[in-house]
Image (cartoon, rainbow, N blue to C red):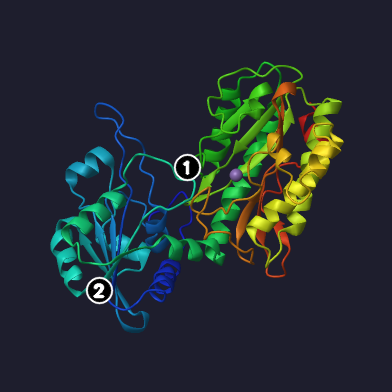
Amino acid sequence: MKTLRYTPIPAEFYRNTRDRLAALLPKQSLVVIHSNDVFPTNADGTMAHHQNADLFYLTGIDQEETVLLMQVGENGEHKDTLLLRETNERIVVWEGARLTQEEAAQISGIEDVRWTAQYAPLLAECMSHARRVYLELDEHPRRYTPVQTRNDRFASALRASYPEMPTESLFPLLAGLRLVKSAEEIAQVREACRTTGQGFAAILPQIRPGMGEWEMEGMLSAEYIRRRSRGFSFLPIIAAGADTCVLHYISNHKTCRDGELVLFDVGAEYGGYAGDMSRTVPVNGKYTPRQRAVYDAVLAVHRYAAQIMLPGVNKMDYERRIRRFMAEKLVELGLLSRAQVDADPVDPACVRQYYMHGTSHSLGIDVHDVTPANPVFAPGQIWTIEPGIYIPEEGIGVRIETDVLIRPDGGVDDLIPDAPLEAAEVEAMMQH
Ligand SMILES: [Mn+2]
C-alpha cells in the first residue's frame, strides 16, 4: 500500500457495513449505488469529486465512476461486485493513477472487482434474479436542489426500463446504520476534530483589527492541510461584525474592525470524515461587557445542552427543552419580556427571533450527517452542540459549537478540547 495522507479504515469495517445492510434486506434484493458525478463548471473545468457518502460507507472507495452491486440471497448472504473506471496510460499521464482492481479489493474487502465496461450486461443479469431493487436516494429533510445526482438518474432510468420491478429507498436503512459510529469511524472523526480545534488554536493569537476574514480563512486552511486534512469539511464561515448574525455567510471578504466580534464556523475533513466547530471571538482580544454577557448566555445554553443529551432522550424533546432554557437567557439579556415567554410556556416561539436554528446535528461522513426522523440519543453517536444568539440590531451574533461523542456510560466527550470555550480562556489566548 502506498503511504497515504491519512490512515484508511481497514477493509474489515466495510465488510461489516455491507453485512449489516444485507441483514436488513429481504432475500433476492439488489442494491445499486453509484459514485457522485464530477460536476462541470465551464469550458473544460470541473469541480472536485466529492464521493457519495453511502458508497464510501459501504466500500471505502473514494473515486469517481464507481458502482457497488450487492445481490442479497437467503439469510443475509450477499454477493458483492465493485465496478471501477478502467485506468489506462493516458489517464495516468493526465490525471494520475486510478485504483487498480487489486487496490480496490484491498480497500473494500470486495473480491469481485471489474471495469465499468462490464456494467450493462452485469446489471441485466442481476435484474433477472432480483425481486426488489434498493436505490440510493438522498432524502435528507433539508436537501433542496434542482440538480439530479447520478443515483437519481439511475433510479429514473431503471424504473423506466423495468416498470414492474419494485424499488425501495436505502435512505432510512443507511441513515439508521450511519447514526451509530463504530470505533474505526470514531477514530476518524476524532482526528478531524483534533485538526479542527488545533488549527484554530494556532491562528487565534494572530487575530487583530484590520485583518481580512479571508486572511483568517487562508491561515486556517494552511493549518488544516499541513495536519493532513484535504481541507475544509464545508465552506468556512468567517464572519465579522453584523455578519455574525448571517447564519451561512461564506463570502469572507471584509476586514475586521476594532470592537467587533468574529464568528468562525469551520471544520477540517480527515479521511472522508468531518469536523464542525464554531467559536466567536473579539477581534481586539477583549469582549465588551455586552458581548461577554451574550457569550456567557450562549455558553450556559451549551453546557445545559451537553447535560441533557442523554441516551434515551429523543431529538425533538431535547431541542424543545433547550429553547425553554434559552428563553430564560433571552429574558436576562433584556431581549424578550417575561410576558412574551409566559404566553407560550412549553415551547416559547418568541425564542426563534434570536435563536432560529437547531442545537444539534449528527456528524460523520457528512457534516450534516443523515439520521432517521426524530432520532433517540444513544452511545456511539456523534453530535454537534451549537446554540447561538443573534442580535442584528446590536451587530452581535454568538455561536459556540463543539462536537461530542456519547459514551457508553451516557456522558459526552468533547472532541474539540483544544479550542477554548470559556470567554476568559479565549481572551487569555489572544493576549500578545
Ligand atoms: Mn454544525
Dot 1, crowdedness within 10 Å: few (<14), some or many (≥20)?
A: some
Q: Quadrant of residue 244?
A: top right
Residue 420 lies, with reference to residue 103, above or below; the image says above
Please, what is the three-letter code of the amino acid marked with disc 2? Arg
For residue 131, the mark is 2
Quarter of the rendered image showing ligand 1: top right
Q: Tell me: 370 left or right of 209.
A: left
Q: Given the current orientation, which residue lies at the most extreme left position?
A: 121
**Front tag of 1 and 2:** 2
Residue 396 lies, with reference to residue 330, above or below; the image says above
Q: Tell me: 287 left or right of 212.
A: right
Instruction: Give the structural element (helix, strand or loop) at label 2.
Output: loop
Give residue 170's position: percent from left, percent from top: 39, 62
**Residue occupying the point 45% across, 62% down:** 172
Q: Which residue is mark 1?
A: 230
Residue 386 lies, with reference to residue 428, above or below; the image says below
Instruction: Give the structural element (helix, strand or loop) at label 1.
Output: loop
Give residue 79's position: percent from left, percent from top: 28, 74
